[in-house]
Image: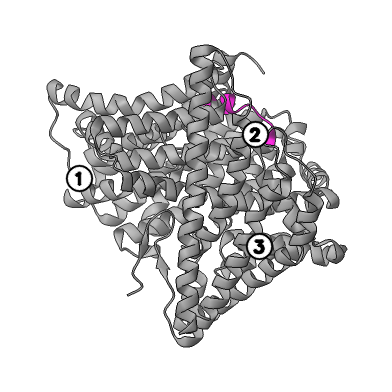
Amino acid sequence: MLIDRIDHLLGVCERTFQALANSCLIIMLIGNMVQISSRAIFDLGISMVFPWTVFLFVWAIFFGFFVLYRQGGDITVDFFVDRFGKMGRTVARHFVNFITVTLMMVMLWHGPQTLLQQVGDELEIVELDRWIQTLPLFLSCILVTINSILDTAKAMRGDPERVFIKGLEDETSPS
Amino acid sequence: MAWILFLGFMFLIIMRVPIVIAMGMAVLTAVFVGGFGDQLYIVPRMVADGVENPGLLAVPFFILAGNLMNAVGMTDKIFNFATKLVGHFRAGLAQVNVVSSMIFAGISGSAVADIAGLGTVEVKAMRDRGYPVEFAGALTVATAVIGPIIPPSIALVIYGFLANTSIGRLFLGGLVPGFLIGLSLMLFNRYLATRHNFPREPKATFKEIRGHAVDGFAALAAPGIILGAITFGFTTPTEAGVLACCYSILLGAFYKTLDQKRLWKAITDSMRVTAMIMMIIGFSHGMGWLLAIEQIPQAMAEAVLSVTDNRNVFLALLIVFLLAIGCVIEGVPAKLILIPVLLPITDHFGIDRVHFGLIIVYALLLGLATPPMGVGVYIMVGITGKSFESLTMAMLPFLVPLVIVLVMITYIPALTLWLPNLVMGPP
């Protein structure tokens, strides 16, 4: 089925983005540890650590944005919708997907304009154009859009929602 | 426009829209309805600008430090240490719950991490000793509010960035209120113990306490490292977070409990939570722009001052307002909406920004334990399997000591300002 194939591809993207976001955090951690050690031992700061930390921080968040949605990690409030039973949950699922796609489409529609405004705007020390820093945001927006459309298709096919424990816990089986 | 922003956000939240998307959509709608439909490009631009924020670099590291401590298994060691220390008090395990959270608060800056990490251990131990599960769950949520008050604190880092206030002063300012919250909950447990005849644990021998003290002090060293490094200017708050992470990894190596899989999971969890917080902040950047254009902070200040020019009356109104808002909006977006609006007013009344920071962070934190947006209660539903309603009912009595401490913090500024002024001098 096309739905399952797209779902599989999104799963690959999820793992890739997760690895990229995690790698950014690891490099930030190591870079700053080297910075602290260098300052403590040699009384010598490393000027490139801070701007690269900021750059990687932004990348980590933008890559993590898709992972957050793919893994259902954002906070939701269920008490109201749950009062309307299965029908309420189905309607809310479609509504959430519609709102998500709308927001993402607006973001993507204006994405090229945002990126073009950043061309030639070079980040100090990092020596990369600012648009490179922002690019993962729009990549995530594309994937979040596809994920939401896919979830709508899954809902129409009768697939159950993926269920997650609120907060920081692992994914649990919907059954 | 401000009403569209606020009500739109509320409506979307109630309709189960995830918080980040709800914030983004509310801003987008307000921009559109406010007559800026041809300037929607500001939304992605604001997100990009809002996320690129060096002032918030410490956030992922403090989250990671807490998750690493969980992965290392420090939660079990802290719990065991606290059991030996205060388990023999009346309502022993309930007191252990409070003390464990106070120690864990010095490692983690997040109440949610406290509930997810310590919660399972605490609730299981209390259930096995015959405490009602609802009571154990409610107490665990109540004690978790200590997490973001005792440093390090992600909430205080965000406040410090929004209010342009020293993170070091805010962290020091949180120490006394954090201990006060713990003390009030312990006294309340003592009171409940006499009514419900909760069991005590056997008194530990000096040798047993000493045996577990090494683990306890290993955990207690973390806040010392963080506070010392920031207060005495050795590191920035971001680097202090890095030090806390490295310390946690070293502990994992020492105890041989941190394998590659656990490390990766801790990093993954941290990245996910960081992405959520920072994307909310990114979208709220557009909201700040809207509030500034509409001159909402000034209008709000005028409205409040037309009601009262008495500082004490204002403070009373403030805490009632914050408690009400905390019930319906999650802490991070609530702070992002309210701090820019309220700061001109608190400045007018001469309320110190560190003092105000502790008031707003703590008052909004209580929303963790109150319906309908009680995230802490939701997590506890997952841990205990009890209903949201039954846990909420069990939670209500604990709000009494928590609110009393809020009133004390609000009306006795010395509780928050004495320590930062003593250590770092007057501002």
Q: Quadrant of the C terminus of chain A?
A: bottom left
Taking depth in this image into account, of B58 and B160 the one nearest to the observer is B58
- The residue that disc 1 covers is B197
Question: Front-most of A44 and A107?
Answer: A44
Say which mark, if any, is on residue B149.
none
B168 is within the stretch colored magenta: yes
Residue A162: image x %, image y %? 42, 71
Label 2 lies in what chain?
A: A
Q: In this view, which residue lies farthest toward the bottom?
A: A157
- Disc 1 residue crowd, few under 14, some 14–19, many 20+, Cα 10 Å: few
- The residue identified by callout 3 is B9
Q: Tell me, yes or no, if residue B171 can be seen here.
A: yes
> Residue at the spot x=57%, y=22% of the render?
B414
Where residue B103 appears, as percent x and y from the top left, is 35, 32
Is the residue at mark 3 from the same chain as the one at mark 2? no
Image-based side of B49 in relation to B361, left or right? right
